[in-house]
Image: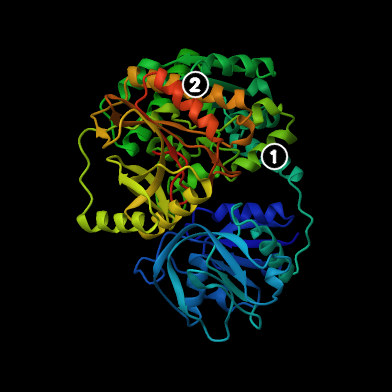
Amino acid sequence: MDKIGVLDFGGQYTHLIARRIRQAGVFSEVLSPLHPPEDWAAFKGFIFSGGPSSVYADSAPDVNPAYLEMKLPILGLCYGHQLLSQKLGGKVKSGLVHEFGPAEFSPRGAHPLFQGLSAKSQVWMSHGDEVVALPPGFRILGSTSDCAAAAIGDDASHRYGLQFHPEVTHSTEGHLILQNFLRLCGCDFSWKMEDHIETLCQRLRRQCAGRKAFLLVSGGVDSTVAFALLNRALGPENVLGLHIDNGLMRQGESAAVMEYMHSHGFNNLIIRDATDVFLKALEGAVEPEKKRKAIGDTFLTVKDAALAELNLDPEHWILAQGTIYPDTIESGGTQNAAVIKTHHNRVDAIVELMKRGLVVEPLAECYKDEVRELGRLLDIPDRLIDRHPFPGPGLGVRLLCRAESEAPLSAATLAKLEQALNSQNLQGEILPVLSVGVQGDARTYAHPCLIRSLRDWQKADGAATALLNRVREVNRVVLEIGALEPGTYVSITATCTRERLDILRAIDDLCTQALMASGEYAKVWQMPVVLLPLEKAGRPVIVIRPVDSTEAMTATFARLPWDLLDLLWRDMQAEGVGALLYDITHKPPGTIEWE
């Protein structure tokens, strides 16, 4: 069986590269870049992943020189492109423009790597550094308007580098580039996803080693597919699912989860209401990481209480989770990865259990699109597979909190932002709130910029990209769809309370019903609804975040019809909302969730 090795330098998309290679019909394996190359006959080529570091930093991840000395083809992506260039004699430095999001790539003449590509193709950028001098023997194979060496190569040594990320779906022809590289490697395209299910089942039986599995089931796509895999691998009599109502669920969500899971044959599932326990754990917590860790730790506390109540011997039961790869990588779960946000299934207590071999995660190397594909192969109904993703911490990470006012931005940053707005004839301001983002594979915690009086999606997209690429201190852009009064937004002290959760629950349900009634629900991949610690005219401020994605590692903002947005604003005013904002940030630089 042909195999491609993906060297992991800590990039957010490393396992997505491996996924895309498998999707093309070639098996792939993620490797440490310092691991000595082994079993040479099995590999047909190697891909160097992206990563959050600068290649010239003292702590930058390095590569075993043996990979550079071998005769097999190499493709470097983003950090891998820069590292390959530096190691082979080129030069890398910080770029004048930091690119995040879509860019237009133009191949420079015909080349086998770009066979079948358009003369101009959208690619996805996420970088601050760039190659400014090529290694000996290399030539430029393609460029974007802000990156001259967007693609480079040396055909004699079969070494190639791309500054962009062809593995993400928002590089619209990136799959063709990867397939072309596989052809350059001489691969046989014969691997199939159907073969993977039995591999996963065999792994689960081996990991459980005669023990039964206890799975926390949210009712979302990931935990549902994990539940089905465990039932298939171990038998329903050896699996128990627990749904915990943590008080952070959507309106009527827990009752609906139990109804549709039981109606589709998942009868080994029970429910516990732990609302009071979770709200107590979140009392006074405002910082996103502390909230996420409090939620994750409390899930374990409630799980242990349920085990004790059911008289289940922990020695004979192993904890199972529906963790998927974005949870792992965003939590800094690989050697060189940066922590973007700690997912509830990656808190310290979980990591410690994993070290002791007490956790199984059948989907840990999968992406959302891959999970859905597995679900369909397992005959799970579309009604369960096609639900919008919902975060494990629930509304707890869509309810932004604040203990005190944020420090103001510097005068220089405000001046830079004003200049960027004026250059596009836009009106806007910085919002006094912070949100999590991802720029250059690293975490940011920065302010959003609000734009007023703009109702042109194409212009909004271009404006957001320009602002975010040129004002590093901003990591999101939002449009003001409606506000009860003009002027500044007022920041408030806000914590995670039952009252605020009920406000968010009601608005979230209003938005979901409107999406379904309009027919837009099936067109949008996900639409988080966020309650900010801000007020307008003494009323709460809401952000909606409709996105299009497939694997959750990249996303573009979805473009809802303006008449639907007008309807939502009218309905929200009737529910006591003071302003409705619309997040028009791609991922990167903004994560899908605000926390």
Residue 551's x, y, as percent?
59, 45
Would residue 175 be seen by someone viewing this image from the given angle? yes
Which quadrant: the C terminus?
top left
Q: Secondary structure at mark 1?
A: helix
Q: Is residue 252 above or below residue 450?
A: above
Q: Closest to the observer: 350 or 590?
A: 590
Q: Closest to the observer: 165 or 244?
A: 165
Q: Can you name the residue that lies furthest to the bottom here?
A: 136
Query: What's the amino acid at mark 2?
Result: Leu
Q: Residue drawn at (64%, 17%), measured in percent from left and top?
A: 260
Instruction: Classify mark 2: residues with Cα within 10 Å, few (<14), some (14-19) or many (20+).
Output: some
Q: Is residue 61 above or below residue 512?
A: below
Q: Tell which circle, 2 or 1, labels the residue nearer the N-terminal end.
A: 1
Q: How many marks?
A: 2
Q: Residue drawn at (49%, 29%), measured in percent from left and top?
A: 566
Residue 490's x, y, as percent?
24, 33
Label annotation for residue 510: 2
Residue 398 placement, left or right of 283: right
Do the CB atoms of the residues marked 2 and 1 lie less than 8 Å apart?
no
Residue 52's x, y, as percent?
42, 59
Which residue has dot 1 on it?
373
Q: Is residue 260 above or below residue 105?
A: above
Which quadrant: the N terminus?
bottom right
Q: Closest to the observer: 65 or 89?
A: 89
Q: Secondary structure at mark 2?
A: helix
Instruction: Classify mark 1: residues with Cα within 10 Å, few (<14), some (14-19) or many (20+).
Output: some
Residue 381's x, y, as percent?
71, 26
